[in-house]
Image: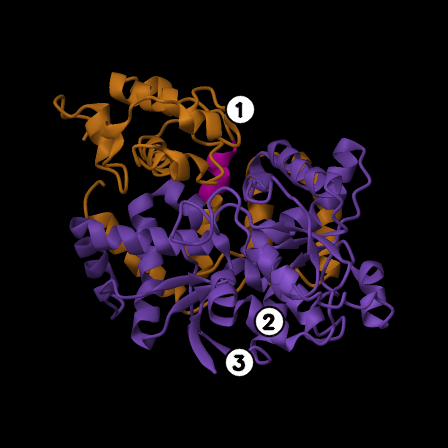
Amino acid sequence: MTENAKTTFLDEVAALPACDRINECIQCGVCSGSCTTVANWEYPPRKAIAMIRSGLRDELLSSNSVWFCVSCYLCTARCPRDIRPAAIMHGLETLALREGYKPPTNTTTMYRTFADSLIGNGRIYEFGFMFKYFLKTNPLAALRLIPTAVSLLMHRRMPLAPPKVKGRNDLDKIVRKMSEGGER
Amino acid sequence: MRYYAYYPGCSMEATGAPVEEAIHAIAKPLDLEFIQLEDWTCCGSSPFAGVDKAKAVGVTARTLAQAEKTGLDLVTPCSSCYTILQEANDLLKEDHRLAARVNEALAEVGLSYNGTVKVRHIVEVLFNDVGPAGLAAKVTRPLTGLKVACYHGCQQVRPSYGFDDTELPDWLDKMAAALGAEPVNYPLKARCCGSSLVISEMDVALDLIHKLLQNAQDNGAQCIVSTTCPLCHTSLDAYQPMVNGKFKAKFNLPVLAIPQLIGVALGLDFKSAALTGNIVSPKKLLEPYFSGKAPAPKAETAA
């Protein structure tokens, strides 16, 4: 898609699932004003949308923006043009990872580890997924979580064996087939 | 008896275990039967949508296709699963190209999806199918005098699938009141707990949880009554000691998921209401109700 000079960044985003209403944006800023974690965003949601329209692809996709999205959907519930800003942020995440950008955040690694756990086990194995994530990023950061992990364990809320369901083979086949379907 | 196809979601097997146990404990007394989807798999959830949205919809569609075969409404207690399932369900109806791709992928595993499933949140089922009056009729242990802050969280009410108000919902408040409790004003009742960001951006999430606890305490709540979402419940309950450490605070606010609160009011004992799994123990707070020393309900005054 990137080789095609006629395809703009805007076209690229608008073609992602649930992102087709981006052209209706009136830059009112309700999304940024509503955003739960906006203080951490290099480019807040309204600005991110302006950048998509201006073709500032590299700047936006290599920034920490969108990775702070907690999917609280305040932006989406309040958007007067119903453009579904949260879906656009999720779309930008997909795009950034697919195109090999390296945003300055560990959330990308967390998401990838999560996806691996999902496909590998069929269900998310919370303990294993968190363990792997901290090994890949900052094992020292896990120290802070040890008391919480111990109390979850003591309250029978942290099984030490992964779920491994038969359905994981189905997920594997579904994801393989979806990969054949071209970029979207 | 009402029947539903039931999809617990991954967290219900781990951090959400007490909430899951409470749901099954109250189902029978409320004449509900939740029939778990066989060999269910992860809904896809937001992290996978971030890695690849289209593939995530394919993963979600497996659950929708399984539910379609049962002909029953698909009920989930996890707000994240609820939003993911709803969003994929809508997307598959409006984006025919994506729906065709997804059905090709589903065919590989002998499934297909025609878009007929109704996805429902268990809190919505409790509110609409049982209802505050239905709950009140089954109360044997009224929670008179218990001041509760009702936490609805984000994805139960947003984006919006016709479920309550997106800014200041009150369905949990109405159910808690039907059980005899006193819901307090709680302005942050539908603000975010940080969800999975507690792993990769711990301080950002702890800050959000801190605000939610502070707001509940400032409004005089003795405990929080949360939605059934295992992420919301775990954030507020299991991470409370970490919030105390970071903010030098002394919160000791038990967090009861609504099925746990219903369980207590229906007369279940502490263990059967699945309260032993709570990290901030509600034992002391609820002691008067279990020992029968709680204040008697006020007599109804004739209008």
| Residue to which mark 2 is pinned | B135
Q: Which chain did the renderer colour orange?
A: A
Q: Earlier in the sequence, mark 3 or mark 2?
A: 3
The verdict on residue A120 being magenta is no
Left/right placement of residue B56 relative to residue B7 reads left
Report if the CB atoms under discs 1 and 2 are less than 8 Å apart.
no
Quick check: do tags 3 and 2 share a chain? yes
x and y percentages locating residue B136 in the rendered image? 62, 71
Question: Residue B251, how many percent across, how many down?
Answer: 79, 43
Q: Residue at x 62, y 57 (%)?
A: B15
Q: Magenta region's main secondary structure? A: helix
Q: Amino acid at mark 1?
A: Asn
Residue at the location (20% across, 55% down)? B99
Chain shown purple: that is: B
Q: Quadrant of the C terminus of chain A?
A: top left
- The span shown in magenta is A106-112
In the rendering, which numbered label is found on residue B31? 3
Residue B104 is at least partly visible in this image = yes
